[in-house]
Image: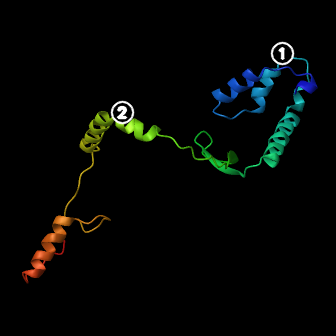
Amino acid sequence: MHQQGINTDLSDIQEKIIRRNGQITADDIRSLIADQDCDVSKISEYFKEIEIIIDAAEETSPYPVFRYHEWSKDIGNYLHDYVRVSDRYIAEKNSDFYPQTLAKYHGLIRKIRHAFEFLKPEGLLILRRWTEGDIFDYPALLEFAVDKKAKRTPKDR
């Protein structure tokens, strides 16, 4: 865009991208260059140039690049090839950070574990004697086995 005589600060463009959650539109670019003397009708050409630059960067990348769809709650649909993921191998580094952190905060870790054991989601209720469901009702299963062993007719639930 600088070659076309359009002077915009990179920080202005970044700010627009951040405010719009990574989506920049032609209207955003129009607002950035509205005060300048340039042909606003060429904005779509600028977008094409930007896409060419991004594609060239992907082709020259030494790492595999993958594109994925992203769900947009604003439009209620997928944005095709919206996310760019570069697959890189990061060499393992020998570090004592994890064991040192565990040793340093062992008391706090124990308290956090204990607190998590007491957490129970509100509204979660175990329903007994239901014929449907994916989880075994172990007390009912035990009762069934005892009735069967005692040669009594087990309940169907």
Q: Is residue 82 above or below residue 21?
A: below
* Nearer to us in this view, 127 or 141: 141
Where the C terminus falls, by quadrant?
bottom left
Q: Is residue 12 above or below residue 73?
A: above
What label sits on residue 59 in the rendered view?
none
Image side of residue 75 versus residue 61, left or right: left
What is the quadrant of residue 53 in the picture? top right
Report crowding for label 2: few under 14, some 14 to 19, many 20 or more residues within 10 A (C-alpha): few
Q: Residue furthest bottom?
A: 151
Looking at the rendered structure, the kind of residue marked 2 is Lys
Please tell me which of labels 1 and 2 falls first in the chain: 1
Where the N terminus falls, by quadrant?
top right
Looking at the rendered structure, the kind of residue marked 1 is Asp
Q: Nearer the viewer, mark 1 or mark 2?
A: 2
**SS of the residue under disc 2:** helix
What is the quadrant of residue 17 in the picture? top right
Label 2 sits on residue: 104
* Residue at image location 82% in from the left, 21% down from the top: 33
Query: Where residue 14 sits: x, y (%)?
Result: 71, 26
What label sits on residue 35 in the rendered view?
1
* Residue at image location 81% in from the left, 49% down from the top: 59
Q: Is residue 123 above or below residue 26?
A: below
